[in-house]
Amino acid sequence: MNLGELQKKLTAAARLQAPDERVPYAFEKRITAVIAARAMPDFWTVWSRGLWRAAVSCVIVAVVCGAISLLVPSSSENNPDLSQDFENTLLASADQGDNSSTMP
Amino acid sequence: MERSEAELIAAVLAGDSASFEPLVAKYSPRVFATARRYARREVEIEDIAQEVWLKAFDKLKTFRGEAPFEHWLMRMTVRTCYDFLRGHQRNRESSFSEISEPEEDWLERFVAEPGSAAEDADAAKLLIDRVLDKLSPPARLIIQLLEIEDRSVKEIAEITGWSVPLVKVRAFRARGEMRKILARMTKDKYL
């Protein structure tokens, strides 16, 4: 059998097939609706997206603070002890109470 | 007043997605005709067409307006069809035992007297569809564009994004692949 001839015949048969240009009813409306639906994300999508952005921002701030605390040299004379100050402020009223009760 | 294509595209890019509808209505027949060359089931054809239009909407800002919108869209359509072919490579290795009676008759007529087997016969169309379905995706795309749609190598390179030498190599391989399939088909029946 002449395969080259068969190939030519079948290719010619394919060429003779008229392109079928039928489009389903209201196809363009469907596409516009899909595009519109994609443009309006639902509440939970917006919420989770915001949550992820906030989480990323928090991580970045934490990393920057950590890097600063590690890299910037600290001297105890210039920087008062924050925990000690906090404790003094918190216990100031109690100290005052003690002082007044011990006074004659 | 009917707006021009450029005006519609500018409106879509400015955020008016409703202006996309006239473009879809105008070019969908061509998109569907192209999709039908690569897919058989209507559901698959509709999926391809929808994907083409969503891609076109998303990538509209990359359309520079140097070439007609239709060319840009058809390039996208052919590439989407190629992706579809690559994702649906099933049943290519099946035998030709399922050939219908009219197809067998047509082949017999061709074997007896090649001139008597008409190209416009329905059986010939069924046979070529069967052969095309068995080709690998690159071979099918090349045979479709080069042999059936009669496009030049340069045009195919532009449509597919392949280089001209690659198109030539793939065309050579595609013809060989098609011949092998035809040989297998006729060997099953007549040798």
Image (spheres, coloured by chain):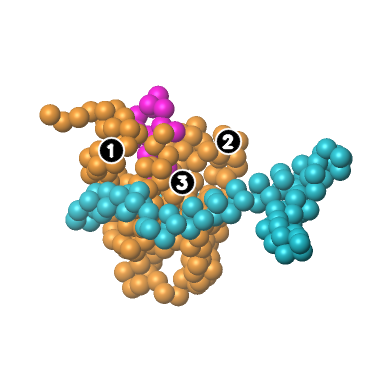
Mark 3 vs mark 2: tell me if same chain. Answer: yes
Q: Dot 3, crowdedness within 10 Å: few (<14), some or many (≥20)?
A: some
Secondary structure at numbered mark 3: helix
- For the record, the magenta segment spans B62-78
**Chain to which mark 1 belongs:** B
Sequence-wise, which precedes: disc 2 or disc 1? 1
Residue shown at the point (29%, 41%) measured from the top left = B17
Q: Is residue B39 magenta?
A: no
Query: Rounded to the nearest whole Å, what is the CA distance between mark 3 and mark 2?
Result: 15 Å
| For residue B92, side relative to residue B119 (left or right) | right
Main SS type for the magenta part?
helix
Mark 1 lies on a secondary structure that is loop
Nearer-the-camera pick, B59 or A45: A45
Label 1 Cα neighbours within 10 Å, binned few <14 / some 14-19 / many ≥20: few
Q: Which residue is mark 1?
A: B16
Which residue carries the number 3 mark? B79
Q: Which residue is mark 2?
A: B163
